[in-house]
Amino acid sequence: MRLSARLVQILVTAAALSFVFYMLLGLMPGDPIDLAIMADPRLTAEDAARLRALHGLDQPLLGRYLAWAAAVLRGDFGFSRLFAQPVAALLWPALLSTLVLLGWAVGLAACLGVGLGVLAALRPRLSPAVQGLALLAQAMPGFWLGIMLIILFAVWLGWLPAGGAAEEGQGDWRFLLLPVATLGFGQMAAYARHAAAAMQGALGEPWIRSARARGASEMQVAFGHALPNAAVPLLVLLGLDAGALVSGAVITETLFARPGMGKLIFDAIMGNDYNLALLALLVVAVVTMLGSLAADLAQRGLDPRLR
Amino acid sequence: MRALVAALLALGFAAAAQPRDVLTIGITQYPSTLHPNIENMAAKSYVLGFTRRPMNARDADWALVCLLCETLPSLENGQAARETTPDGRPGIRVTLRLREGLRWGDNTPITADDLRFAWEAGRDPATGFGPAEFYRSAYELIVVDPRTVTLRFDRLTFDFAAMGDFQPLPAHIERPIWQADPRAYRTRTQYDTNPANPGLWSGPYRVASVQPGSGVNLERNPGWNGATPAFRSIRIRTVENTTALEAQLLSGQLDMIAGELGLPVEQAAALQRRAPSRFRFEFRPGLIYEHIDTNLDNPILADRRLRQALLLALDRPRIVAQLFEGRQTVAHGLVNPLDAMADPDIRQYPYDPARAVALLEEAGWRLAPDGIRRNAAGERLSLELMTTAGNRSREQVQQVLAAMWRAVGVEARIRNEPPRVFFAETLSRRRHQALAMFAWISSPENVPRASLHSDEIPRAERNFSGQNYPGFRHAEMNALLEALPIELDPAARRPLWNRLQAIYAEELPSLPLWFRQDAHIWPAWLEGVRPTGHLSPSSLWVEQWRVR
């Protein structure tokens, strides 16, 4: 499929998802005013009715969706009830923060995972150790690992902050290390196992024997011939993982009190902030689809048979 | 090596010698707005405690005190006077005078015009202020002089001096925005679009910057004319996860955790055991009333003896001791013992399983071979017990309650729901079949009309408004709830309160469990913080906080 067709497909899917997300959010029990009533015993029934009318919550759900969609087409994404700011203004810093976190986490996971996978393929006697480490990483819940890292590096050793974001004049990298390690470690397992399997498969191919016969060193065989071929399934995995990584970021960002998309979505849904939750979910969906598209393109670049 | 150690020591002493002029506070909630009148929540109340002053508030001794006003209005000092409203109802006229020398952070004087603007905006339903009962009742505001206004109310209630959320708003900044479009005011107010504008703030601190969802930075307010606060800067950080909040405290990222929005008592008590000398801990009883609402339309629970038996079968002190390390105050009614109107002689229900069994037998419930009682018709004494799913502490309590009831032959069937379903769908529509455990937030001498008057039973024809979830109907209680707010004499109110509490304790529309305590955790070097235990946060008196 042509690139332009894929982009149109993403746009149409995003439009359909906006309807689905809006309906799901609107059908959740309770509304923002219910939350306000629980927080403030002085809110009377009259106040609740007035505020519902003011926020348009007394209108039918479909009508609210159409009004929202019309506003979006005018470039107005609405106002966040939870943060008292235009939704678009909140979203971009959060998205940037999450992309930085995800970028480093994916980088760490891919480098470590592929490195371990290649090692396991090249040194079969190390394979059980690599597989064991991968199993451990996959089985370890992210929030537990995060808490352990906080206790060790922030509370006991005092080397790194326990969470939050950098203040003015502080280096952001110190605040990134533990969340990146938490998110990246679990992800690393999948890359290690897939890389090992793909490398073992590639190393058994006839053209590898030919390369060896031509006198290529083991390093050249591994990194020049086998790895580029083994990278194709890993790219598919990377594309499919984009969504899973964002959901992992919810836990990591909540645990480390790090402002980002995951935390924003969590707060928005728990706080009945429909505008914010809707747009944030849509952005994540679009980022996931774009991630998948990028993986496909990279795959095409690496594998001439797909062109 | 020695030189290196000496240099490091010197650096250490230099660091220690630096004055502590920044205080970093952890809380578990982010304020959704910084506008004093739009949407109320504990986090906003806490942050605004540093940055703006209401007219008056209740202090740590639960006494109403002036903050911006010169004197509290009263009938005795002539600043309040009974009158009749234009439509012939009993009303009251209250005069408020601002203290001299009050200024906004941009040095603009705080005047009666700022009060007038707040009143005008609050009166307009399109503005979107939260609780608007005050503005509906205050039908006229007269500016007497630049520091004095008179408000006329169409109702006469004993709490006329408490101004609640009514406070000056900076008319020189906010009025043009509001006048341009009252409906859009809540999204355009500078409190949210430009909170660092010093002209918005009237407290010892002003907002310097905000990080949405993460924190608010405060600096001393140059316009403040009271005592200079101890810290040059206060940083408030939001960490929703309490494990992460504790970790940030232990790692030194936070100096203190505010009790108003801090760790659960059991977590704080565990921390106190582990680090008893590193921090100062104070557990302050508050106004959050944990209880179990019954459903009186359930034929089993309609029998008062059964409700009394259920309470007698619970060893609440033991639950508090074992699950909360003794850090909750066992409740004997809905009025907090710290409240001036609490009746110490209220009927109490000590743990007495024998008496519970006798009451159940008297009500016709006999023990069956399976250990659960049955009545003459063969119905099992089985009750559904609901609470908010995911609240670990409540779910633990629920298990203990079920075990204690089972010991006297009552089966509790646990069915929990996520909070939004539990509150918005089940409780508010009275769909709980038997028992529902949750908490009420209240305020000192708060007349519980919404939860006890029969007019407040949620029903479809009233669009499910009201919070009388048990469906309690009691003519004398209704009369008391109507008489209490309009009785101005505290001495005359006391017997009414006593009677209200006596009926509650006798009828038990809800089973009282305990009043929650707030766990305040401060650094050893901080003093002067006085938790209030009610909705006015300790931050309202930040100028009294000092470094030891």
Image (tube, helix red, strand yellow):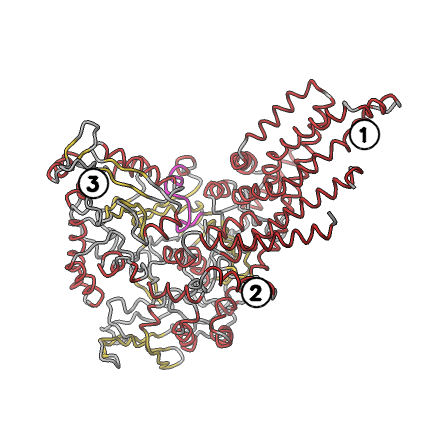
In the image, are marks 2 and 3 on the same chain?
no
Question: Which chain is disc 2 placed on?
Answer: A
- Marks 1/3: CA–CA distance: 76 Å
Q: Are marks 1 and 3 in contact (CB under 8 Å)?
A: no
Name the disc covering residue B227, or none: none
The vertical placement of B166 against A36, above or below, is below
Closest to the camera, between mark 1 and mark 3, is 1
Q: Is residue B422 left or right of residue A283?
A: left
Residue farthest to the right?
A214
Q: Which residue is mark 1?
A: A225
Predominant SS of the magenta segment: helix
The vertical placement of B438 against B170, above or below, is above
Task: Look at 41% across and 65% down and name the residue there.
Answer: A51
Question: Which chain is disc 3 placed on?
Answer: B
Name the disc covering residue B310, or none: 3
- First in sequence: mark 2 or mark 1? 2
Q: Amino acid at mark 2?
A: Ala
Q: Nearer the viewer, residue B257 or B279?
A: B257
